[in-house]
Image: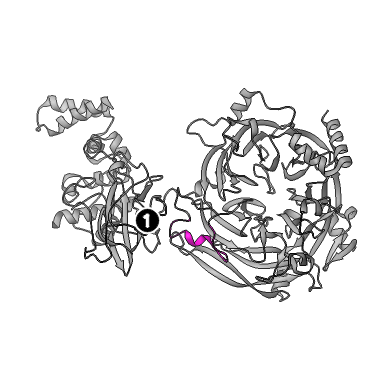
């Protein structure tokens, strides 16, 4: 755990530092290699989603409705839209994370907690690993739609 | 040496009779232990951490009422499936969903004696859809599905006293069979003197039809037979698939001190029943309808829900005294036979005579020929008694004392457990001669070969289920757990590999290759398929409802909290129903709930399942509740409070989380 923690702190510093200089760019690349993650994985998470998806700016209403159903059944026990619960507030998650990242987090929470710097950070903060809730890829996509819609309208 | 030894023992048996037998039982002890070099034995049973066993073994729990599941060859216990006895660990028989499974015509019966498990079959092979097991005491048969390893259904049998010859299935699970061990007056609640036994008492053989889609059982018909004790049964296979066989003892019709009084006749019988013909007779209206009262308890949800009890009021019977056509025959069999076992080809029907000096082997083809030739010695209540010499294929000489049960390896050999001389004998189905014998520790009852009682056994391992452990393990007071012993039967000689303690008193056991069922086994209860009427399917619907004096709490559990976790407004005099849904969908992550002062048990809820417990508070005050399963790092924090006020209190019913 210790080496991981070191990496995590290093990365946390990297991400919180302001953009710029070559030296910082180098550090990030070095850490990325150590972690063995690609740029895509760093930004969009580790899991079954390995490429950008074609997602329109408009909300697909059918997907949103399905997403809300799944959310209420499988997510709401631990997540509020506003305010921390067992896990972080999700009202603005569509702002903070890419759709691909959200889907990978839903579909591969164990892997994210273990191998992704942001996942590790969440475990440190919330003291529990998000469970896989038996959500299909299709339903994860629907959840994204619900979260995007919520983010836009609240 | 063994042969001489046995000749001597046989002399004792014949000379001094039963008293000497009993004396031997208490003094006799196996002399030597033959096992593989212990290093080799260890290697054969070693399954490395994280690796899986090759077989699932299902062992009956006997007087524990349950069914235990073992990995073989490691003999690691994988699970205890509660069936006929309440189980506080899982709330089985305590939860509102499962309590109806224990309803019988005698009331709520929370215990039984579970004897013989049998896996459902297709074409004579174990197919792993369901496993059935009988309750011996208050006669019942249960069905467990092998997707969730959960008891789904319990059916009571009418006209039955001691459902011992059960729960064997026919080759395609058309029927599960049962039979009465004790003959009893078969008219419902008939109050007669016991010494009217021969006039008023009858035996019954039960044929329980199985719905091939749902597995649901139904008593199709019973055959009313002479008042003997019907002990064990087996379905035929292959050429004899249309037949089932039952052993009888007490053809003397004794009703007291059977130990002596039912041991007089030189031969008792194996009853051979052509079930296909019997079923046809029923379809053609030859049965008669009798009053009866028996319960059929089953889950009403496809996936989840509450078990319900249906009460049946009649049963169709075929009385051999009233039907001209023959569909049942008696095969004379020496002497107080216990087990009846059919070899993988379906040709040989092997009796195990508790007091017999040989193992009698009947031939199915000889039997058909004897029927054809009218080779009949006698008729008893309309049942033809076939000639012994006409049906018998051979007698195994010198099998040891008290042969009970036989299994087969599919390679031409049979293995018979021998109770009094504590050994297993291996004999040839060609020559009917003993080819090997090995000691068992001590007093073996049933035995099981992996894939046994199918048309295609996996002749790798054999398990002996013995009755006393004595010095085999570290002592645990005057009572030891019953042992099982694992043998390697892949070679010419049987070799002992391992001893291990079991639960209750295993009678029969069954096993199936793990890869036959492993892919069908559920990892979670899918929330989207949760059809429990009191499931909490939306977190926002967590709530408390009052209906008169009943308070219903709809609660969700996930790592690491309950919703709601603060409840007020319950009053003394209320019955509180906690419906707990585990909202998680991760394999093996369970949550529980225990409430201080509850007279019942905890609930333990697997992922995606809903369970309900009823609690009647007895005092006012604050009642903490907590999760009984260590579910996460913050497991200790998974708790809450219920406030119970006086009966006239005006505390409003409220519930909350995080407020």
**In this orientation, which residue lies closer to the viewer: B620 or B630?**
B620
State how many labels appear: 1
Relative height, residue A4 to residue A58 (above, below): above
Check the residue under mark 1 and report the chain it is in. Answer: B
* Residue B625 point in image, percent of width and height: 31, 50
Q: Is residue B277 visible?
A: no
Range of residues picked out in magenta = B93-109
Rendered residue at 84%/32% (across/down) = B3
Relative height, residue B5 to residue B636 (above, below): above
**In this orientation, which residue lies closer to the viewer: B17 or A10?**
B17
Rendered residue at 59%/27% (across/down) = B43
- Rendering quarter of residue B653: bottom left
- Residue pointed to by mark 1: B527
Q: Can residue A91 be seen in this view?
A: yes
Residue B106 belongs to the span the image colors magenta: yes
Relative height, residue A2 to residue A148 (above, below): above
- Rendering quarter of residue B160: bottom right
* Residue B213 point in image, percent of width and height: 55, 62
Q: How is the image coloured?
A: one colour
């Amino acid at each position: 755990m210790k080496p991981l923690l070191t990496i995590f702190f290093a990365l946390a510093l990297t991400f919180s530092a302001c953009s710029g200089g070559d030296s910082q760019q180098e550090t990030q690349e070095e850490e990325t290699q150590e972690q063995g993650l690609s740029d895509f994985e760093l930004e969009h998470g580790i899991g079954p989603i390995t490429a950008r998806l074609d997602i329109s700016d408009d909300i697909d209403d059918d997907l949103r409705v399905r997403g809300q159903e799944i959310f209420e059944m499988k997510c709401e026990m631990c997540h509020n839209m506003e305010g921390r619960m067992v896990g972080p507030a999700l009202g603005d998650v569509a702002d903070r994370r890419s759709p691909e990242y959200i889907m990978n987090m839903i579909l591969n929470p164990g892997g994210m907690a273990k191998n992704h710097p942001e996942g590790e950070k969440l475990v440190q903060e919330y003291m529990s690993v998000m469970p896989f809730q038996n959500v299909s890829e299709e339903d994860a996509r629907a959840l994204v739609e619900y979260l995007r819609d919520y983010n836009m309208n609240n | 040496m063994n042969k001489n030894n046995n000749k001597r023992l046989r002399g004792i048996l014949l000379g001094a009779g039963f008293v000497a037998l009993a004396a031997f039982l208490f003094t006799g002890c196996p002399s030597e232990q033959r096992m593989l070099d212990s290093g080799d034995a260890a290697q054969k049973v070693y399954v490395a951490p994280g690796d899986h066993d090759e077989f699932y073994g299902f062992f009956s729990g006997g007087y524990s009422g349950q069914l235990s599941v073992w990995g073989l060859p490691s003999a690691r216990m994988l699970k205890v499936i509660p069936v006929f006895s309440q189980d506080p660990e899982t709330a089985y028989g305590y939860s509102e969903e499962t309590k109806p499974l224990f309803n019988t015509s005698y009331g709520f019966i929370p215990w039984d004696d579970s004897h013989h498990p049998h896996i459902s079959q297709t074409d004579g092979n174990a197919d792993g859809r369901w496993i059935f097991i009988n309750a011996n005491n208050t006669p019942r048969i249960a069905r467990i599905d092998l997707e969730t390893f959960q008891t789904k259904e319990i059916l009571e049998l009418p006209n039955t006293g001691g459902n011992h010859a059960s729960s064997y299935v026919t080759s395609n699970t058309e029927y599960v069979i049962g039979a009465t061990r004790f003959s009893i007056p078969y008219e419902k609640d008939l109050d007669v003197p016991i010494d009217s036994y021969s006039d008023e008492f009858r035996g019954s053989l039960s044929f329980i039809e199985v719905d091939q889609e749902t597995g649901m059982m139904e008593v199709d018909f019973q055959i009313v037979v002479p008042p003997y004790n019907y002990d064990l049964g087996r379905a035929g296979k292959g050429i004899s698939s249309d037949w089932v066989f039952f052993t009888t003892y007490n053809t003397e019709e004794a009703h007291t001190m059977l130990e002596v009084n039912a041991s007089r006749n030189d031969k008792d019988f194996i009853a051979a029943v052509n079930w296909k013909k019997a079923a046809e007779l029923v379809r053609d209206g030859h049965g008669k309808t009798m009053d009866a009262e028996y319960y059929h308890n089953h889950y009403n949800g496809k996936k989840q829900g509450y078990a319900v009890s249906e009460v049946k009021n009649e049963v169709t019977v075929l009385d051999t005294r009233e039907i001209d056509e023959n569909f049942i025959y008696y095969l004379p069999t020496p002497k107080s036979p216990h087990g009846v076992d059919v070899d993988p080809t379906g040709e040989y029907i092997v009796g195990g005579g508790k007091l017999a000096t040989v193992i009698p082997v009947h031939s199915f083809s000889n039997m058909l020929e004897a029927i054809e030739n009218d080779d009949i010695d006698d008729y008893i209540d309309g049942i033809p008694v076939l000639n012994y010499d006409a049906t018998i294929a051979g007698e195994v000489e010198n099998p040891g004392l008290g042969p009970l049960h036989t299994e087969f390896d599919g390679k031409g050999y049979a293995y018979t457990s021998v109770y009094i001389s504590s050994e297993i004998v291996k004999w040839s189905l060609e020559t009917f001669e003993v080819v090997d014998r090995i000691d068992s520790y001590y007093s073996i009852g049933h035995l099981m070969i992996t894939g046994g009682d199918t048309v295609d056994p996996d002749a790798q391992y054999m398990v002996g289920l013995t009755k006393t452990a004595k010095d085999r393990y570290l002592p645990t007071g005057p009572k030891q757990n019953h042992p099982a012993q694992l043998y390697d039967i892949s070679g010419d000689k049987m070799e002992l590999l391992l001893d291990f303690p079991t639960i209750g008193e295993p009678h029969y056991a069954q096993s199936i290759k793990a890869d036959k069922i492993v892919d069908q086994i559920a990892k979670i209860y899918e929330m989207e398929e949760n059809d429990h009427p009191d499931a909490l399917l939306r977190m926002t619907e967590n709530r408390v409802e009052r209906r008169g004096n009943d308070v219903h709490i709809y609660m969700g559990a996930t790592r690491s909290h309950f919703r709601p976790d603060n409840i007020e407004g319950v009053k003394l005099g209320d019955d509180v129903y906690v419906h707990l849904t585990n909202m998680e969908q991760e394999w093996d992550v369970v949550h529980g709930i225990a409430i201080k002062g509850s007279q019942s048990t905890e609930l333990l809820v697997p992922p995606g399942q809903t369970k309900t417990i009823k609690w009647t508070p007895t005092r006012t005050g604050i009642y903490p509740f907590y999760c009984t399963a260590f579910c996460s790092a913050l497991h200790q924090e998974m708790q809450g409070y219920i406030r119970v006020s006086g009966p006239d209190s005006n505390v409003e019913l409220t519930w909350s989380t995080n407020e």
